[in-house]
Structures are given as structure tokens and as C-alpha cells.
Amino acid sequence: MVLASASFSLSAKEQITNHEKLAAALAVNDLPSGFVNLEHCQVMKRIGSTRYEKWSFSVTFKEHYGINNRKGEIKASHATELMLEEKDGSPLLRRLYNNFTSKSGEENVEFVVAVTDINGKVLLKRNYFCPWSKAVYLWRDS
């Protein structure tokens, strides 16, 4: 009788469900990623108008993030360029910024979406409060 054994490397994912778990993951350089679903968030501030108010946006700590231990905050930011189209069909370049802020002991994260023209003028800005339990989906390798 011949027994064969196979070794599989399965990487389980652990969901980050609060600020303390996020801080613990970052402390060991286990950089989580995922998304924020704005459908379950409350708009706290509006500048400009848009039909894209309830989108989902990716969040990653693999590139730009900061930890302010004095304030108990963790922030991640992302910027990308968008090529949109004018009503006449001509191209229109915009910049999209996302900022994710988690604070120690808070049930919500703050998520900011801003769109600027190429010169930096703010055309659209939304500040959201998003509950960890309903809107934030981050995972880390465990």
C-alpha cells in the first residue's frame, strides 16, 4: 500500500473588524486591504453634486498609511487619475482621492472622497462616517 501526502499552503484570511485589530495587523507589518461600502455610510459633509454617492472604494495599507499614536489614529490614502468625458466627447482629466481614518475606541471610520481638476481645485468632496460592522471590509493574512 502506498500513501501519498500532499502539502498545501492555504492562506486563511482574517477580517479586520475594529481599530484595535487594524493596529495589531499593522504592528506586525501584515498590511490589510479590502473596501469600504458607502451604501452603509452616513454623509456628514458635501461639496458639489454627483450621482456616484453610494459607491464602494478599495482601501489598502500596502502603499500610503500613517499611524498617529498620540491621537490614536490610523490613516490610509490613495490617489488616482481619472479620464472622464465632457458632454461633447472631449477627454477630461480628474484626480480622485480617498482617505480612510480609523480612531481608537470608535465604532465608525471616517472616509473622504474628493475629486479635483488637474490644477487641484476641489470639484466634489464627501465626508462619510462608516460603521465597522456594516461598511468596512478589510482582511489580513493570518
Image: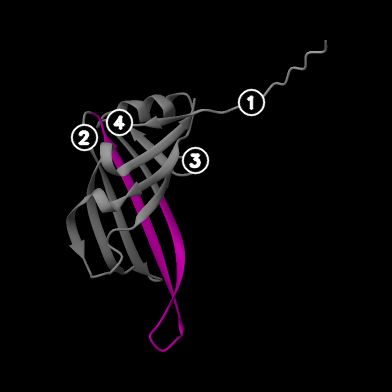
Provide the residue span drawn in magenta.
78-104
Q: Position of residue 71 (x, y in %)?
A: 24, 32
Circle 2 sits on which residue?
Answer: 107
Q: Is residue 120 magenta?
A: no
Of mark 3 and mark 4, the one earlier in the sequence is 4
Q: Which mark is residue 64?
A: none
Residue for point 38% across, 71% down: 119
Circle 3 sits on which residue?
Answer: 62
Of mark 4 and mark 1, the one earlier in the sequence is 1
Q: In this rendering, is residue 88 above or below 116? A: below
Task: Tell me the kind of residue under disc 1.
Answer: Ser
Q: Which mark is residue 9?
A: 1
Q: Is residue 110 left or right of residue 9?
A: left
**Badge 3: residue crowd in 10 Å (few <14, some 14–19, many ≥20):** few
**Badge 2: residue crowd in 10 Å (few <14, some 14–19, many ≥20):** some
Give the label, 3 or 4, closer to the camera.
4
Q: In this rendering, is residue 5 above or below 141? A: above
**C-alpha gap between disc 4 and disc 1:** 28 Å
